[in-house]
Each structure stands twice: as C-alpha cells, then as structure tokens.
Image (cartoon, grey):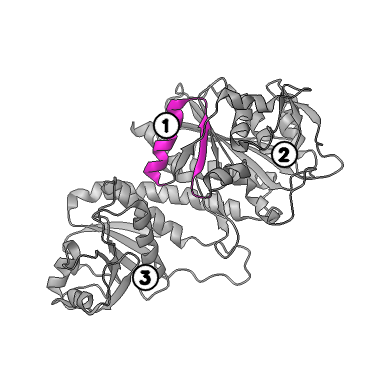
Amino acid sequence: MEFNVKHGALETIKTGCLVVGINEARTLTGTAASLDGICGGQISAAVKRGDITGKSGQSLMLFALPGISAQRVLLVGTGKNAEMSDRDFRKLAQKVVATLKNGGATDAVLALTALPVKNRDLYSRTRLLVETVRESLYQFDQFKSKKADKPRLKKCTLWSADKADAEALKRAILHGQAISDGTDLTRDLGNLPGNVCTPTYLAKEAKALAKQFKGIEAEVLEEKDMKALGMGSLLAVSAGSAEPAKLIRLSYQGADAKAKPHVLVGKGITFDTGGISIKPGASMDEMKYDMCGAATVLGVFKAIVSLQLPINLTVLIASAENMPSGTAAKPGDIVTSMSGQTIEILNTDAEGRLVLCDALTYAERFNPASVVDIATLTGACIVALGSHTTGVMGNNDELIEKLLDAGKQADDRGWQLPLFDEYQEQLDSPFADIANIGGPKAGTITAACFLSRFTKAYPWAHLDIAGTAWISGGKEKGATGRPVPLLTQYLLNQVQG
C-alpha cells in the first residue's frame, strides 16, 4: 500500500474516493460541513433522510457530488463522543478498508487525520491509521492453490488542511510503514506450517534479512557450538527431534560502537508437541505458533534497520523443535545450563524457558543496555489476561515502565505481573538447583521467576505473548504480529528520548 500526503482545497482533489468522517450531532461540522456547502447540501440531506446518522460503524457512499472532484465520497460515522478511543478509531479505519479494498476505486483520499482521538496528537493518530489500514489489508495465501484476489485499493493519500502538518504526517507514514512491514514479516513467519518453518528455515530467513541491509552481522550457532558453550538446557529440548536446534544472532550498529546494544531474545520453538509430556490433540496444530517470539524479534529488527535508527540492536533466537522420541528428554532428567545452574525437568512441555535460559546467559557477552525476551510461554497468561494484553515482568522497574508506556503509545498494551520472592520458592528442587515448573499456581509468574535466575547481570524484562501472538480457531485464525508495535515503539523512544 502506498501512502502520500496532500493539503489544500479538498473539493478540488481528484481521487477515486474521498473519505470523510461525520459524528452523531444533528449539525454537520468541520470537513463534512465544508463539503456540504459546496455540493449544495446533499450530505446534510442524506443525514436528514436517515441514510446515515454518524453512529460509529455506519457508512454511506455518495457518487458524483456537484462541485467535488472526487468520483465518490464515503461518509463514515465517528460516533457521538467528542474524542474517539483508539479502539473506535481503529474500527473506523477497518470499516473504510472493508468498504474500499475491493470496490471500484484504486486510490482514496482520507480526510481522517484531524479527527480527535483521546491522548493522541497528529503524528500518533496518523501512524495508528496507517498501521490499521495495513493490518486490514494483510492476507496469507501462500499455500492456497487458488490465490485470493489482490485488493483493488492501491494508494491512500492522507489529507490535511494545513501545509504545516506535512512533516508530522510524513514521519507517521514512515514509521507506520516500517512497523507494518515488520509486523507482516512476523505474521508470515508465524502462519507458516511446522513442516516448512523449522529452526533451519528460521536461520535462513535471518540470513536473508541480513543481506537486505548493509552492515548487518549474522551468525548461526549449530548444536556442536552450543554443546561447546555448555548449553545443556537448550539442547535437551531438541534432543527428541530430527531437526537440529539453532541459536541465531543478528546485530545492527546504528550508533557509536561504544554504545551498549539493546538485546531482544525470541523463543523459537517451531513446533511444540510437549515432548514426552505430550499435549492433548485438540488444537495442537496451533503449536506452530510457538515460534512467534522469534518471529517478533525478526519483525522488530526489520523495522528498526529499515528506519536506520541511531541505536545498537542485537536479536537472539533460541530455536528448536520439541518432539517425543527415544532420544527425547524425560520428566525427572537433570541438565546443566550454560550458566552452570542445574535444572530438573519435571515437565518437558515447559520447554520454552529451557531454551531461553541459555540464550539469556549468552546475551551477557554483549554487555547489553537492556534485554527483553519475548515468548509464547504459558497458557496461564491467557487465563490471567486473556487474548488482549501481553504479560510483562522483569527485574528492572524503569525498563518495565518504559515497555508499558510504549505499549500504550502503540496501542499494543501490556500489563505488569509481580515477581515477588515468595514465588521463587515454588521452583525448589530436591535434586537440582532449580525445577523447570512451579506447580499449578501462578504459572506465568513462576515461569518468569525461572528466567530471572539467568538475568542478574543486566536490566531484563519478559513479555509473555501466549495470548496475544495469534488468534485461535475459525476463519480469523492466524498470527497477529504482536508485539512488534510495542517493541519498535520502545526502541524509538530510546532514540527520541
């Protein structure tokens, strides 16, 4: 999708469709009122007839209005509140795309950036608009023998009455497009089936991404390299699979070489059967999404590097396939992590923390400014927060607050859960330094407690995206691309102050 910026007299702009918002007030205001005067009152006449009242979710297409150069004018309801919520604004944008994407117009002018959205300035509401339009146009038909029709809508022009707004609009488009490109990559990787997206495939995708941009370092550690490093925990997860594990690193240096890098660590379990502690069969197909943490860090990396932000960024992906076999790890096995801590594996389906702990220990060598791991880690997080909010935990309050603020800015929200010392006791083992599960209570928290044992050397936060990384069941099933917007905003904020 191409986005442009235009200002000036709206009625003189030639376009396939002009999109204008109207509220539930009986008297037209703003852009709608101006256009109504030019077209001889045809918009207000439609309102009086009851064709549209301005209620949120309503729309009305008008054709060939006199005095207006646009071939069509799409009126969309903005509701009765003085300011729209993020959710209402997104729904409005989704309605616009649903109406136009397969309609007669190939281009549209959106006179929507001036609409009042609570706690959002011109830049942030415009970026939200761009990202929502892109999200609504996403489709994944790589494995369909009959491909879906491509949307007819190819170009959106964002209109503003004031030329002085152009810089903010262009910056919003630049950032929104980069975030959307990263989100699309994350969704594509997440939606791939497990027989295609293996640890080896992820490694190839990471190397291909590195080749798209100059100055990117790419490294893939093989199982022999991990064994030499003492990563017994990570290797215990891949032991039952014919697919070899990979530890993937991409590094981008956009700032001074002396500046500490921010590190993102992604869980990359490309398929999770549960291992010997095998999962129930229902919905097991969705365990291809257990690598969405890995997909996320690749999406964020693409967004940051395409913007050439002045920041140093390293992403690590701990990737393996968790399968049951004669060589698989068993409940009761004890392994030694790279940190030297021993782990009693009480449940082989708590494998994400086993791959992440070694990757988090490995992250120490980069002397990081911060480390954030992203993982579809626990079903308990879905019980606690549902599918709308990402769980956030960590050892540094300042880092956690920055992530929560970034989530609000990006409309990709997180919520902090506690990591009190009392929870750590649930991980006690009579035979090893630590057990890999802490019983049925507070499963999301005890999983993060486990990871905290390996993150004492730097500021660290953990994002549990088990509820937000994909949508389950039905026609809407698929990867969401979250939390690419949250993390990209977090890194943008480090640069912008």
365 or 125: nearer the viewer:
125
Question: x, y percentage for residue 381?
Answer: 57, 42
For label 1, count other residues whose C-alpha is less than 10 Å away and answer few (under 14), some (14-19) or many (20+): some
Nearer-N-terminus badge (3/2)? 3
On-image quarter of the C terminus:
top left
Nearer-N-terminus badge (3/1)? 3
* Residue 172 seen anywhere in this rendered image of the structure: yes
Nearer-N-terminus badge (2/1)? 2
Question: x, y percentage for residue 306?
Answer: 44, 43
The residue identified by callout 3 is 106
Residues in magenta? 387-411
For label 2, count other residues whose C-alpha is less than 10 Å away and answer few (under 14), some (14-19) or many (20+): many
Q: Is 279 rendered above or below residue 253?
A: below
For label 3, count other residues whose C-alpha is less than 10 Å away and answer few (under 14), some (14-19) or many (20+): some
The residue identified by callout 1 is 401
Label 2 and label 1: CA atoms lie apart by 34 Å
Q: Check the image and name the residue furthest to the right.
A: 326
Res 245 label: 2
Res 144 label: none
103 or 334: nearer the viewer:
334
Question: x, y percentage for residue 93?
Answer: 36, 61
SS class of the residue under badge 1? helix
Q: Confirm or deny contact between disc 3 and disc 2 (CB under 8 A).
A: no
- Residue 406 is covered by the magenta coloring: yes
SS class of the residue under badge 2? loop
On-image quarter of the N terminus:
bottom left
Determine whether, in the image, residue 46 is placed left or right of residue 289: left
Q: Quadrant of residue 96?
A: bottom left
Determine whether, in the image, residue 299 is placed left or right of residue 272: left
